[in-house]
Image (cartoon, grey):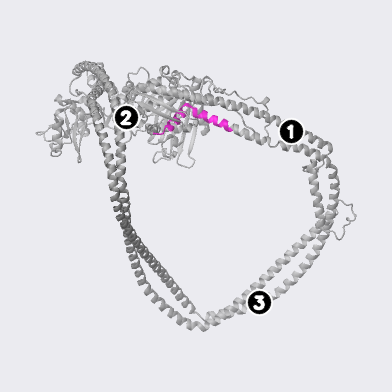
Amino acid sequence: GRDSTRPGGSSLSAARVGRRRVLPAIDVSLPMPLMASSNRSNTQRPAPDEVAPRKKQKSLLGWASSGPVLASGEHEVFLQAKAQPGTIKRIELINFMNHGHLTVDLKPGVNFVFGRNGSGKSALLAGCMVALGCKANAVGRGTRMETYIQNGKQSCTARVHLFNGTSDAYKPDLFGPEIIVERVISRQAGGNVYVAKAASGATVYSKLADIADICNHFNIQVANPCVVLTQEKARKFLGTTDDRNRYDFFMQATGLDVTKQNLVEMQAELERMKDNLAAFEDHFPELEEAAATAKKALDDARELEELDDNIADRKAKLRVLHAREAAEKVQAAQAEVEEMSERVDAQSDRLARAREALEEATREHERLVAQNAEETEVSSRTAVIKRMQADKMHKERNRDGLKRKAETSEAQALRQKQKAAAQRQEAETYKKELAARQAQEARELEAKRADLQAKIQAFEAETQAEQAKFDAADRDMAGSKQAAIEAQNREQHIKRDLDRLARDLKQLKESKGPHQRAAQFGGDMPKVLDALARNKQRFQKLPVGPIGMYLQIKDPQWGIAVESALGGLVATFVVDNHQDRKAFEVMCRDLRLGWVPQMLVMRIEDRPYDLPAARMPDASRYTRMYDVLSFTHPMAQQVCVDRANVERAILAPGFDEAKELMWTGGTPHNVSKCYTQGGYAIYTRGSIQAQDKPGTTGARSRLCADASEQIRMLEAELEGKKEEFEECRRQSHGAVHARQTFDRMEKELVAKLGKLRKQIRAHKDALDQLNSGAGAEEASVEEALEEARLMDAEAQARLEAADKLREEVRALERDIAPLAAQIRDLEAECNALATQLEQSADLIQQAWHKRKKLEKGLEKINSEISNAEAERAKRMAELQRAKRAAADAEAAAREGLAPGAQLPHVDERATIGGIQNQLTRMQRRKEEAQKAAGRRRSKGGIERVDVESLRAAYEEANAVLETEVKKAENVRADMSSLKKARKTRDRQWSTDRIEMGEQVSGSFDYEMRTRQLAGSLQFDHQDDSHNSKLAIQVQTSSVDNNANTTQNVATLSGGERSFTTMAFQIAMWTFVDVPFRCMDEFDVFMDDAFRRQAVTSLLAACDSHPTCQFMFLTPQDMTSMIKDDDKARHVFRMPNPRED
């Protein structure tokens, strides 16, 4: 296997690096106050290192459901591949993010999902995580689940089909060969539904806890970044500068964080047992006291009997006194009722006389009011006056407020001007004193500056001498280094050219006849053309393509320029409508090519465009690209015109000629771009002059020669490239050796120059410190003067604001004057009317007062009658209660006496309080004696306990005390065993942490060396894992020990950072045994060479886990990189994003 070749690949056993290691659960609970089940003879605890085996589920052969469900051919594929249960078979997204309805079928082993940016690759991964129970913040795409719902929709669905085969299936009798996990997210409150369905589609579970149980069974860890690496988590890993975050990543991936948490919980349980045991032992004195109390209870038994007799006598006398008191209360209540009845009768007579007087006064008042009808006019005018006065008062308050604001603003402005003048005067005074003091200090500083400058000049002279030596060595070294770099780059470039030439030659040789022309634009193009010929009936109009088949170049020297301008259009098909486009895509998928050719939806016509000369460049002055092309199909001409603007492109032999045509004297008329023979595009966009690199490579064009001519050219070019590659390899080895020699010389000179420059910097810093000392005080003076100027400006602004406020005050005063005049006129009219009504008003007022006085008197009499009647009713109720209480007291006093017997004699001087006090003292004494004697209460009253019962209680208390002491000893023994188990596991955890760190560091270096890099992981293990650190050290060359080494991943190139992240991920795979792993855009920032090496390393690592499923998301089409691989790899292409 691959792991056996890695350093430290087999240092840990499978039991220690497989699934997450979880410590066995130990029941150390200690119920309070007594642990009835803690007897050691009845409690069996697991051994410290014992791990409970995982429960096996029923075999798939015994599965049965409500309906017959047979394993499909797709299921057989997973069984034959020996895929782990829990592997993903299908992912479905409905209204999820940018997907209306997307279905992706995955296969066992390696799956590549590629598509353009914005096609929803990351949404596919997010949907998988959401369906399997991840929270929004763990997915990294927002903090609320509603953000995943597509715009304009009310809900979305994420559904994952899990493989449930082999003997480790999860409840196969319920689910069958497949588990469908579904999560529906709705915008409504509580709209978050989990469903687990069987293979038949029947719902089995509908709770999150059940989904978590399924994931735990299969060890699915979608929240673990080592299992599912999203763009956000990868970006965080690449950009972090905190080594503690990387250490947390390591702990989570290895499962050591779970083990550490178990150890912490065990320690907490020990502390809880210790506290419970202490509280348990606290009640021992109570048991000892209970035994002593039982003995004393025996002595108090006789005293209780005597107390019972005395209490019974006092209760009988107390009942007699209560009966006597109740009879006296009845007599008093009867007298009060008779008195209240006489009072009510007298008040009723007064009420009748008061009503007659009130009726007479009311008639007189109404007569006078009818004579005074003009009072209404006075009231209405008075109301108008009040409204106008209120308006006037409101405006006067506004005027006064504005006046106060204006005065306040002027006062503040004056104070601020005074403060600014004082500050300005103080600053100018200080400035004069500073100038005098600085003149004295300048002379002293000048001497120090001269000394420092002399030292600096001496060191600089020595530095220049050493720098001259270094420059001489560097000039010699530069040529060697540049030669080595150029040789290596040229070697890689030639190697890529060899691979490309061999691939092109193979494609051409395998094609025969007319299909050779099509093979020049893609190896599978002959298959596509054959399929089109067989499926003509599927299309309304037969698609046309590839476009390059219908193009010919009249002059071969412009082949590279034309192909650079057309780009991917030469391999494009034209379809007439969207229905034909869908039929074309289905046909390509049926061919299982792994890719779909590029398509353009255009109406297919049988005639070319008629291009007017006014739209094209002047043919007499320029070589037009349109003129060097010949079209054998009208659609080829239309595509080149519509998509590439060939009618507006011109040609130039060289780069300089093209720049002169496009950039000198402005852009030519009707010209968009100018292409050179090498394929460069020169153009002007707005005011910006721009150029594009060639869209194709090499010195050949697919549009120039026929297939046989191209085969001969390719064979000749391939032989020349092989010879050039061997010569370049010899030059590269010689240049590398020379560079290593110069590197040693450079290192010595750099160290010496660094020491000299450090001394120069120290003296220059001292000189700068002297030069900058005087500037601080001058700056503070200028700041004070500037602050004074700002204060003057602010004061002026306040004065202007005060002027505006005063203008508003004058406007309000102009409004108030006419309003006051109107109020005076209305008041004069009201006074005239008031004089006329004055006499009649006096009479009305007197009548009104008389009427009100009589009404109040009537109300008072009514109130007194009501109160008297209420009081009489109250007295009557009290009389009845007193009679009932007297009867009850009489019955209670005679309770227990024979019929006709006399009541017990009670002294006339005895009182209820005195007898009650005696009874209370006796009952209190009895309760104390009962507690001492062990009396207990029951529903029937207080039960007496004899001497034998007291003796039995004493023996029972003694036995309880001995039993509790024995239980406490057993708990102490259990705590000792648990402490030993925790200590053993803690040592094992520390050992595993170190060993796993060494193993992952070796694996990381192994993966880095596959790309001629070197790397190591520097672990700083601390007792507190929160303070532990993990630093990544990367050396940019594994063959050169003197290459640059960095611990800051951010300083690496984009490709190196991505490859470092991937190598770290692969190294961590050893510690997590999961059914599937996912990585999003693992090849971001990589060039083709980096990407090819990364894919090779990635596939090799995948092959070392044959039962695991892998899903890699990338914007690059991986078909060409894996087509020569001898193992089955699966590629899924995402649909292109909508452009609307």
Asked whether 652 or 935 is in front, the reply is 935
- Which residue in the structure is indicated by mark 1? 960
Residue 256 lies left or right of residue 761; in this view the side is right
Q: Is residue 424 above or below residue 440?
A: below
The residue most toward the right is 901
Q: Which of marks 1 and 3 is in front?
A: 1
Q: How crowded is mark 2: few (under 14 residues within 10 Å), some or many (20 or more)?
A: few
Highlighted range, magenta? 240-268
- Which residue in the structure is indicated by mark 3? 354
The answer to which quarter of the image holds residue 342 is: bottom right
Q: Residue 320: x and y, percent?
A: 84, 56
Which kind of residue does numbered mark 3 sit on?
Ala
Which kind of residue does numbered mark 1 sit on?
Val
- Do we see residue 328 in this rendering? yes
Q: Residue 752: x and y, percent?
A: 29, 28
Label 1 SS: helix
Asked if the magenta segment contains residue 258, the reply would be: yes
- Which residue in the structure is indicated by mark 2? 1053
Q: Residue at x 31, y 34 (%)?
A: 758
Q: Earlier in the sequence, mark 1 or mark 2?
A: 1
User: Mostly what secondary structure, the magenta segment?
Assistant: helix
